[in-house]
Amino acid sequence: MVSTHPTGVQHSGSQYLPQRRDTNPNPSPNQELLPLTARVHDHDLLEIGGCDVTTLVKQFGSPLYILDEETLRSACQQYRDAFKQYYKGESQVLYASKAWNCLAVCAIAASEGLGIDVVSGGELYTALQAGVSPNKIYLHGNNKSREELILAIESGVTIVADNWYELRTLVEIAQPAQSIRIMLRLTPGIECHTHEYIRTGHLDSKFGFDPNDLDEVFTFVSQQSALNCVGVHAHIGSQIFERQPHQDLAAVMVQWLRDAAKYGLNITELNVGGGLGIKYTESDDPPSIEEWVKAICEVIQEACAAENLPLPKLLSEPGRSLIATACVTAYTVGSSKVIPEIRTYVAIDGGMSDNPRPITYQSVYRAVVANKMSSPLTQTVTIAGKHCESGDILIKNALLPKTEPGDILVVMGTGAYNYSMASNYNRLPRPAAVVVANGEANLILQRETYQDLIRQDRLPERLKK
Ligand code: LLP
């Protein structure tokens, strides 16, 4: 049976191609399923960044993360330009690199004028090695180690202080006459509708100072010459489609600015975090990057005017909406299992180790077959990973053309929290990643080898044969 669209039109993988540029010259990447450069060539083959996906897999192996540079740059530019357009004060977009932290991605974001948000010594080290300017790096984390704090201080990055333990540690390790540039992370007590694990702004969160402690925190910070507190920060969660929670947050944060002034603190920066969602399936309908930025800027400007406060430097730190849509993961189809009347499993050569989101958050993805883009979608199958775990299912009920071993299955929207959360479960080597642009593909992450897998293993003498 050939599946048909509600319009009666038979559909194929091509239905997921981005909106045509002639009708929308500047589509918001977070509102598309495939990267902006995706095309079908030679009738049936998927091309991204001018490169044929099946050829990329032959050249770089499978599975393969394919990052479209134009989509990533376009998202960076849309954030940057929207803040310029809608905010009358100074602004700075930071890339929340936890979404995908590696040298090439940090370098691309920085070359677009973005700063980088890092959450560990490892992410910080990577951003510095990528050449990101320390004055555009912000270190987060709810339990930064002394070593991480020292690295941050020595590198000259801003520390987003999360709790009392950290404030006291900073005062302790500061050199005489040193003034450490910090921001304060506060929990705004705002609920949003997203998965419980990726909500952070509600009161019962492990992140940030309790707003009821504001008085004590501002008093303490204002008395420490070792601490140069320049701003406040909050982040309410991830994959959010509603605009209201972020607008509420912006209004609450302006109240914090007003309160800080009473303690003699000269707070000039306000960081509203990230969280804008992306389209993972046809039914997802997030606001565009521009709409999200505009909504926040308006609230801050109105609230500052009402309080008679000068406009702060406005920072935001999106991760997912900058990079998720820019990347797809290409897998090779292998075995399949038909359970009559129940389900057909089609297995691919990766799974929960390269994309742990479905098993962790029940995240839903869509896929196309890169070598059958125009074929009718005739079967509903379950895409199974190759791990020894029944829950290792990438997509339930994927509507696909008839697949055969060797077909290249492309899962869309995998740029955020896939590589960065990847593991070696079952000792699968992590895939390679390439960046594609103008018909050229460059390796940005080498595929791990079996030697890499045992590189950190040590075999005590007495266990050797
Ligand atoms: N800023 C802070 C302080 C954050 O904690 C996060 C995300 C962001 C910015 C970026 O948020 P985004 O724009 O990407 O929504 N692993 C989960 C997502 C965890 C998000 C953690 N924090 C997932 O795969 O959905």
Image: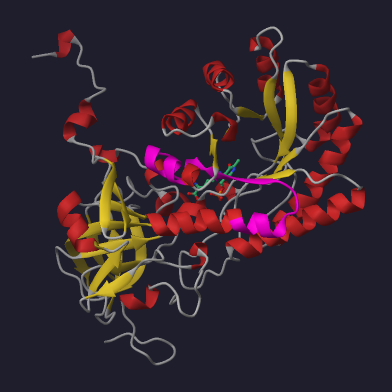
**Number of callouts:** 0
Q: At which x and y percent is residue 82?
A: 63, 59
Residue at image location 26% in from the left, 22% down from the top: 456
> Would residue 107 be found to the left or right of residue 318 on screen?
left
Whether residue 325 is visible: no
- Give the image location of residue 237, x and y in percent: 61, 49
Region in magenta:
81-108
Say which quarter of the image contains residue 194: bottom right
Q: Quadrant of the C terminus?
A: top left
Give the residue displayed 20% in from the left and 62% down from the top. 54
Q: Nearer the viewer, residue 171 or 27?
A: 27
Furthest residue in direction bottom, as rendered: 8
- Residue 87 located within the stretch drawn in magenta: yes
Q: Tell me what residue is drawn at x 49 percent, y 29 percent.
A: 124
Q: Is residue 91 magenta?
A: yes
Vertical side of 202 occupied by 385: above or below? below
For the question of whether residue 386 can be seen, the reply is yes
